[in-house]
Image: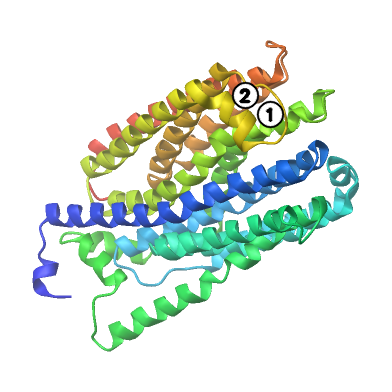
Amino acid sequence: MSDSEARRSPAEQARAGRRSYASGARILSIGIASTGLLTFGYFSIASHVLDGPSAKRVDLLWSVTFVIISVIYRPIEQLLSRTIAQRRARGQEAHVLRVPMLIQGGFALVFLLLALALHDELLRVFDHDGALYDILVVGTLAYAASYFARGWLAGHERFGLFGALVLMESLSRISFAIAVAVGLAHGQTAVALGIAAAPFVSLVAVPAAFARQAGDRTREALGGPITVDEADAALAGPGTEGVQETAAHESLSLRRGGGFAAAVSAIMLSEQALLNAAVLTVDATSSNRSLAGIVFNVLLIARAPLQLFQAIQTSLLPHLTGLEATAGHEAFARAIRVTVLAIAAFAAAVALALLAVGPFVMEHVLFGQHTSYNRFGLALIGLGMGLHLTSGALNQAALARDRARAAAGCWLVAATAFVVWMVTPAISDQVLRVEVGYAGATALLAATLAVLYRRGGAQALSEPAIAT
């Protein structure tokens, strides 16, 4: 690292950090935008090539799988991303993986034991289809490695490889549905196999990540170009030696890491309740066996942008964590403000489009089942999606400030309110009940997280710029 780079002003360092974050978010957005479209395409194709009950079982399989992997694996992704980013921002090269690996392995083992113990109950969920049960178990276990790799890549800001990983996952999944559509395979099991195959195929990006990391270390040893870790150490700037010395004695204990993972698990469970509880409650209470699939289709309006927003969330957490460790409140607040404004503009455009052409597109373009959609209900889903995305940004701010437990409380309140609403027949039309309930629950969530964020901002202003 040259002397001129080491003597960069704080303003120059902040601009470099913003460019790195914006560049990473753009790169990752390309991969995850493609992933969102391909995921939407997978279920759209499935709805055309399968009958209503079979398509509904594939929807349920994905809902159950996604709930499980989000609750037990996404916390480790977030833990790895935050921990690695924090240590890199403080100039530390060693990134401890043992504790996250132990927690991840423990979660996977607990899932396997519960899946075996609840074999008969899970079979009933899938109308006694044993193949779908096997796909659930194998696919969920495989996702343990995929999500661990995601956390490592995010913490090291390897966003191109992160995008490649999720893109490979979605490409492999949709290829099974396409195979059925063109006649190379047949039936529900062939379509569903894509859910289990996807995490295995996605891991082809991992060797490239480790090869790049090894190359960086080799160049550093030979005195070559500055590595990513060296640049991050430079971004810490002068005056952070005390923080680095303090951090050098810190370690991620099993208790601390487990507490963070448990709080994020509660957040992920609450988020999945907002996206999937309606599918499950409608399936359990409706005499129309295809209605749960229609509710799933409606919530795909929210799910697809949320999957796209994972690009922003994934790059936002290490960026905010770095700002919290090395910069001040203004830089932190600016990143959140820009993100929320962009979300608001996007959500308004989506809601207006759904109000104008939503029913036609849903009925005649995207899905094969013949049903009518309420344009105002679809617009409510669009607005709720925007509030959900805003909540995601505020949630990352809370995690970066180590307020995971308080954030989890906000999510649990909103999710509980939504589930209670869904089992209360306040609106007889169950699809409209879902649309109104989702918009209301996400509004409650965004409001409570905004209060938490403002409190965190006030606390940050009263403390030194560099967190210890």
Q: Which residue is mark 2?
A: 418
Classify mark 2: residues with Cα within 10 Å, few (<14), some (14-19) or many (20+).
many
The crowding category of the residue bearing disc 1, from other C-alpha atoms within 10 Å (few below 14, some 14 to 19, many at least 20), is: many
Tell me: 232 left or right of 273: left
Q: How many marks?
A: 2
Judging from the image, what secondary structure is the residue with disc 2 in? Answer: helix
Residue 35 horizontal side relative to residue 238, left or right: right
Gap in Å between the C-alphas at discs 1 and 2?
Answer: 9 Å
Residue at label 1? 278
Asked if 252 appears above or below 404 in the picture, the reply is below
Query: Which quadrant of the structure image shows residue 23?
Result: bottom left
**Would you say 144 lies left or right of 93 here?**
right
Which quadrant of the figure has residue 3? bottom left
Helix, strand or loop for disc 1? helix
**Which one is in front, 4 or 180?**
180
Q: Are marks 1 and 2 in contact (CB under 8 Å)?
A: yes
Q: Position of residue 120 (x, y in %)?
A: 91, 47
Q: Position of residue 46 (x, y in %)?
A: 71, 46
Amino acid tagged 1: Ala
User: Going 72% across and 32% down the picture, which residue do you hit?
Assistant: 369
Specify the amino acid type for callout 2.
Phe
Would you say 201 lies left or right of 20 here? right
Q: Position of residue 395 (x, y in %)?
A: 44, 39
**Residue 114: where, in percent of width, then height?**
80, 51
Whether residue 413 can be seen here: no
Closer to the camera in the image, 48 or 301? 48
The quadrant of the rendering that contains the N terminus is: bottom left
Residue sitting at x 42%, y 33%: 390
